[in-house]
Image (cartoon, rainbow, N blue to C red):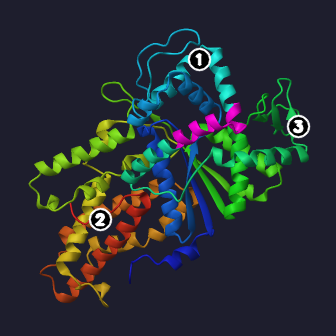
Amino acid sequence: INFKINRSVLIQVSRIFSLFIVMVHSPNIAKKFHAGHLRSTIIGNFIANLKEALGNDVIRMNYLGDWGFQFGLLGAGFQRFGSQEKLKENPLQHLFDVRFSMPGGCTPLTSHLHLSQVYVQVHREAEGEECIHQAARDFFRALEQGEEEPLSLWRHFREITVAEYQRVYNRLGVRFDEYSGESFHQDQVLDVLEQLRTRGLLKSTEKGTSVVDLSPAQDMSYYSTVLRSDGTSLYITRDLAAAVSRKEQHAFDEMIYVTDKSQAGHFRQVFEILRAMGYRWAQSCRHVPFGLVQGMKTRKGEVVFLVDVLDEARSKMLRNMRESTSEDYLGITRHETHAILRLPLQDFKGPLESDYKFDWDRVLQSQGDTGVFLQYTHSRLCSLMRMHGNEGEGPCDLTLLQESQGIVILQHLLRYDEVLWQISQDLQPRYLVNFLMILSHLVAAALKALPVKGSPPMMAQARLQLFSSAHTVLASGMRILGITPVQKM
């Protein structure tokens, strides 16, 4: 019996597609990552890892909010409040942390704000100032019409944002094959609108907006707006164009959108409109919703940035290791330390749709059923493999494993393909988390009850093969979850 992953078997027992696009929606450009954005990133990474483990080709796509009226607000705000000098220093710093009040009316400020500060301040002022809204509409209209000044500003902001996001993704151990965005598909918007007109799906309201009637009785009781009265596009229009473009470019078998559950209605409309346009492949588009992160505050009451969480987590682990006298901590590198804390495993323990309560102690805890426990189990198995070298290779008699601790591990390992099949259907990582936690507890008990050293050669070889198989499955499952297994702790 060999419990190493048999990829061909897993493919046979699963309904496999050849090409997936897993698309993670990122924050809008010029907005700094806060810890709430971690959910879309790690969930999208988990889904992509799972599909690849099952033998699929996967395109990992990061989709930026880099177009639309919100960018009109940012562009108009930067023209009024921004500074190129400040922009060079740290453009995404101090998001949501500007305390000074704005003057009334639409007069320019003498002080200058960082890019993210401009983003927040102009949104605050826009709540009570119609002239800000008009300036934003004018800026976005000029952008869509291809005027050079707003386009140049947009390109600069986008480059800054992507560079910042890539640094954060590198720290998380997450990669993307493509950095896309709403702006990439602006040219296809006109084609989508023409298709809607040709099929008689485009209607006008009294306000002058263009809509698609989605009501069963065609009585306009339920419709989706796809064009503003001033002729500018909306989020949904660009999503329609993006979906059509991706199908033409990649010929995907399934496309998975990973966003929070507040956008469930939006994607339901996107898929309904695509089907109404005659695209049968719309049935292979899927939205994976997740709950919102609540309580996103530091102990000082401030918004939590993701970089701060990563820094705090690494500092805490390094401090714990410096204080520890255990030999298990010797030889670990800073990179491995960070790998331990790449994923707050609690986030995957329940249904993805559940809201997630952010808590510093919970994120940073190292005791109990955590990612640290999985890493510790993996490192102990690695240590056992190193100690006994090649002793476990070759044929061995597993019938010698008569003890209950060995039998339950064998039975549990046999369920691995069943677990992967289950999560491939509903994309819920909690089944895999539960499987790996149980496996780790079983291994911990077996390491005490089934010693390799000092046992008769045939028995030692059988036990070593058992632990080697457990090690292979544990490492495979951890990688699917997005946790990089470490060799030492």
* Cα distance between the residues tagged 1 and 3: 35 Å
Magenta stretch, residue numbers: 141-158
Q: Is residue 349 visible?
A: no
Q: Check residue 443 for magenta coloring.
A: no
Q: Amino acid at mark 1?
A: Glu
The numbered mark, 1 or 3, whose residue comes first in the sequence reads 1
Residue 147 in the image: state x and y as whole percent.
68, 36
Q: Amino acid at mark 2?
A: Leu
Left or right, residue 137 beside residue 479: right
Name the residue tied to disc 1.
Answer: 127
Question: Under tag 1, what secondary structure?
Answer: loop
Crowding near the residue tagged with mark 3, few <14, some 14–19, many ≥20 C-alpha atoms within 10 Å: few
The numbered mark, 3 or 2, whose residue comes first in the sequence reads 3
Residue depth check, mark 2 versus mark 1: number of the one nearer the observer: 1
> Which residue is rendered at x = 46% and y = 27% of the image?
83
Residue 55 in the image: state x and y as whole percent.
54, 72
Q: Is residue 24 visible?
A: yes
Quadrant containing the C terminus in the rendered view: bottom left
Q: Is residue 195 above or below residue 355?
A: below
The numbered mark, 2 or 1, whose residue comes first in the sequence reads 1
Name the residue tied to disc 3.
Answer: 218
Q: Amino acid at mark 3?
A: Gln
> Which residue is rendered at x = 32% and y = 44% of the image?
310
Name the residue tied to disc 2.
Answer: 442
CB atoms at circles 3 and 2 under 8 Å apart? no
The image quadrant of residue 138 is top right
Crowding near the residue tagged with mark 1, few <14, some 14–19, many ≥20 C-alpha atoms within 10 Å: few
Question: Under tag 2, what secondary structure?
Answer: helix
Left or right, residue 40 beside residue 237: left
